[in-house]
Image (cartoon, rainbow, N blue to C red):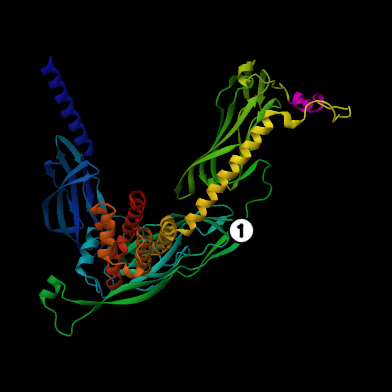
Amino acid sequence: MKNGFLKITLFLAVLVAGVTAWGQNSFKVEAPNVVEQGERFLVRFIANGDVDQFNHPSFTGADVIAGPSKSISSSTTIINGKRTSSYSVTYTYVLEASDNGVVNVSEASAEIEGSTYTTKPVSIEIVENAAGQQSTQTQGSTPSQQASSQQNNQGGSAFSSNDESAVSYGKADLFLRMSLNKTKVVKGEPIIATLKIYTRSNIRAFEDIKWPVFNGFWSQETEAPQNLNFTREKVGNQIYQSAVIRRYMLMPQQTGTLTIDPSEMVCQVEVLSRPQRSRSILDDLFDMDSYSLVKKRLSTGKITVHVSDIPSGAPSSFGGGVGKLSMNVRLTKDSLNANEAASLIIELSGSGNLNLLENPSVVLPSDFERYDAKSTNSFSMGADGYSGKKTIEYPFIPRGEGVYEIPPVQYSYFDLSQRRYLTLHSDTITVKVGKGSSSNTGGMYVPQTQKQVSNLGEDIRYLKTAVPSIGGGTFFTDNWIYYLAAALLVALFFVLRRFMDNRIALEKDVVRSRNRKANKVARQRLKLAQTFLSQNKVQDFYEELHKAILGYTADKLSIQRSDLQRDVIQETLLSKKVPKDDIDSLISLLDDCEMVRYSPEGAAGAMDAQYRKAVELISGFENKL
């Protein structure tokens, strides 16, 4: 019996492991979406899993220079005790683009652990070489940039320079661009604004960033990447590395010609400084050229948007919606008892300015006690604005039994595709209300109609017309409640007196006061550091982070600023039995902040992680000290 149980357990474990491994297997192709004539580039086929057989693709429009070369990668990570392993096999081809206009890569297939996986065919656009540009190496770019360019497999979009929804200024090898998906709209119609940077050089840092101003628009930032993801993109007849810096959702709230003020920034760019000698093969192999940093100011220029008003004659049920909507009306329950709660649910689904919709008007029977409506949103951003659903709940309680009807709900919106108002209608809803029980009201009298509610104020009047007498009876001091109240007041006086004495002593204790205020001060300083983080100001961020950590440590450990040295901090923390790992993390963070002062290069990418590390350390010390 025991052996049988072990066999079943082992079989289930193997089965679960096999299903998990099978679910993780995949096979995909990576290739650039655009290349230049004569350019050499890479096409990779990546399998997550052990490949039993690889069936090669075919290529047209390009010559195969090398490949396929096979490489294997495996890794294991342990995070919070959870072990994760990965294994992949990559087949790489080196191709050289011809002048046929397009490179076609057929499908490839691979057998992975008994199953066959197939990639989709890929088309790669070939761009004619621009004048003065080399076929395999771009003037002013390093070999590492070209490799990164060749490895990039994400798509881009081509657009012409006369597109009025996008404005850009700058050098031919570097410019900033703000593009709108449309510039002629009606009031309330959603617009997607995308701020991108295009470069053929190596960008080292950004500074003095001025974000665009959207006067006359309702605006919301929908994408703000911490690390820029560069992709290949064709502009005119040249290939650039482009990256989205910000993306916004705009909805005009005024009519007429609205102007979007420009966005500006200063870029630090590597510029090639050629040596004063003839080049050799070693220069190309080992990147012997030298580079210098040059600052370039970029601007998007101003963009105008033409906003017309929606047509007059809107129905009375118009709720401000612009886009495409549908409506669903239902009850949480259509059969209930008197004094029992229920809700009318209205769901407005579709796309457009869903976040600005007004609630529909609902008429409930007079015998229904109505409560304030509440709404919930479930939106996502798309090309036509927000898409998703807005749900409005109207709670009510029927106070009398019977059969009631809720009139149809009407809701009007302006349909963008048809350029006219459309009205959504619901059906009449019937509600059956049974006789309520006294248990639903807690034994209290509940009026059954609104008329009875209005008569309560007239029917129940407790007025005494006789002149009150102050003679006779017992005086209030003869009651025991008087003495109990007096005793409580005396006790409350001494409690408050003791509390105030402790408060005064606490304020006089400077050390304890500094300790209590340490976390608040550190949070305020970290808040300023977070502002510099969002503005990508590297040196300002690290200086403020350094001040916040040292200031918190001095206040929390009661160390004079003149004695605030590493050995003093370590000894004090050790004496308070703080774990050595936390102490090492604190010292390491201080070292990183000081290092950036002298060598800021490459520090921008670690700013977010360093900020989280500082917050975790301060929160941890609050619990341990």
Magenta: main secondary structure = helix
Residue drawn at (68%, 50%), measured in percent from left and top?
312
Residue drawn at (57%, 38%), measured in percent from left and top?
374
| Percent of width and height locating residue 543 | 36, 68
* SS state under label 1: loop
In the image, 414 versus 377, the foreground residue is: 377
Quadrant assignment, res 198? bottom left
* 197 horizontally vs 346: left or right: left
Q: Which residues are magenta?
A: 450-460
Q: Relative to 476, is 163 above or below?
A: below
Q: Is residue 153 visible?
A: no
* 517 horizontally vs 256: left or right: left
Quadrant assignment, res 394? top right
In the image, 25 versus 158, the foreground residue is: 25
* 478 horizontally vs 541: left or right: right
In the image, 316 versus 607, the foreground residue is: 607
| Percent of width and height locating residue 273 | 23, 80
Q: Relative to 329, is 262 above or below?
A: below
Q: Relative to 42, is 420 above or below?
A: above
Residue drawn at (37%, 51%), measured in percent from left and top?
622
In the image, farthest residue toward the bottom:
276
- The residue carrying mark 1 is 254
Residue drawn at (36%, 67%), measured in percent from left and top?
560
| Percent of width and height locating residue 601 | 28, 69
Was residue 458 drawn as part of the magenta stretch in this picture? yes
